[in-house]
Amino acid sequence: MVSSDSAPIQPLDALRRIAFLMERRRGETRKVEAFRKAAGVVLATDESELRARAEAGTLTDLPSIGASTAKVIEQALAGATPDYLAKLDAGPLVEETAETTALLERLRGDLHSHSDWSDGGSPIEEMVATCLELGRGYQALTDHSPRLKVANGLTAERLATQLSIVDRVNAHLDGSFRLLKGIEVDILDDGSLDQTDEMLGRLDVVVASVHSKLRMSSAPMTRRMIGAVENHHVDVLGHCTGRLITGGRGTRPPSEFDAEAVFAACAKNDVAVEINSRPERCDPPDDLIRLAMDAGCLFAIDTDAHAPGQLDFLAYGAERAARLGVPVDRIVTTWPVDELLAWTTR
Ligand SMILES: [Zn+2]
Ligand SMILES: [Zn+2]
């Protein structure tokens, strides 16, 4: 479970929560994965066997269970909070001002996330389980498009298969949460989109982003972005400057384009400007968010989560939007899902 609870924590929940808490603090992927793999083994093992092994000290004979994960399982089985879990920081990611807290409470989900179908680290089901634990009302699954081969972008055929899986996931849920069908589609050099019109038409949410030739000069880049914004399938303009300000991938300056013209096109076409919450992106920069506000744009505060723990990154985007005074009614991710879908099918 993601939320803390007074009842003793079960081994499976303890392992998953450890992975979540490490991931939201950008812990080492290898360690996070070790806890998730162990959770998978616990899920597939009878509790009676777990108890017998804990007593006999043979938990580590199970695949993917090491000394640390075995100790977590033993302590949880004994009804105690595992030491490993107790020492992790479960506190807020950002300073909890009244404005930020109020906005965070209004956010119902986000329109940009990835699964292991493209370059995400976790299966769709694990992303959904975490959304439920975070109390989200919906989440858009937006894996990459075909030309982004480094990210294992989905062909039209794979996307069609994914959509049937999204239907099945939703059929298992009680309706209080909805997984939305989406894509993060590449904006090609000429402003066209990297997926068939037919497939784009079957989706709830289309996020369009530039991932290649980020150093194109301003005039063609402006035309390229406006071309995408004017496409009637597009709902959100993803991480518009492409900048990277920190992190393992190094830094990257923002792309050059006529932001006033691009945001005017967003406002005219009812396309939301994404406030990308990833700490290494922090995109758009403050001055461009102000410019987009002046242009009358809608906004989507998105996590761009590539792993379950990153779904908590919403706090970073909320902190920025609250600090800059983005009007809440213009943030589409505060809208009820029906209203949101009425807008995406506009
Ligand atoms: Zn992207
Ligand atoms: Zn993305």
Image (cartoon, grey):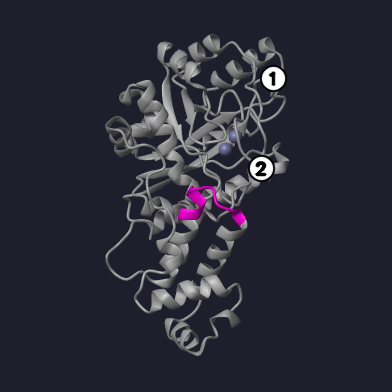
Please provide percent x and percent y for residue 203: 50, 38
Q: Quadrant of residue 230?
A: top right
Q: Is residue 345 visible?
A: no
Left or right, 200 with respect to 106, comes to right
- Amino acid tagged 1: Asp
Q: Residue at x 35, y 21 (%)?
A: 325
Q: Residues within 10 Å of mark 2 (few under 14, many from 20)?
A: many
Please provide percent x and percent y for residue 27: 55, 52
Q: In which quarter of the image is residue 192?
A: top right
- Ligand 1 rendered quadrant: top right
In the depicted structure, whether residue 227 falls above or below residue 233: above
Please provide percent x and percent y for residue 343: 39, 28
Q: Quadrant of residue 341?
A: top left
Left or right, 4 with respect to 240, comes to left
Looking at the picture, tell me which residue is in the foreground, 16 or 163. Answer: 16
Look at mark 2 in the image and give the residue it sits on: 153
Magenta stretch in the rendered image = 21-29
- Amino acid tagged 2: Gly
Disc 1 or 2, which lies upstream in sequence? 2
Classify mark 1: helix, strand or loop. loop
How far, Cα to Cα, is label 1 from label 2?
Answer: 19 Å
Look at mark 1 in the image and give the residue it sits on: 190
Q: Is residue 160 visible?
A: yes
Classify mark 2: helix, strand or loop. loop
Looking at the picture, tell me which residue is in the foreground, 92 or 234. Answer: 92
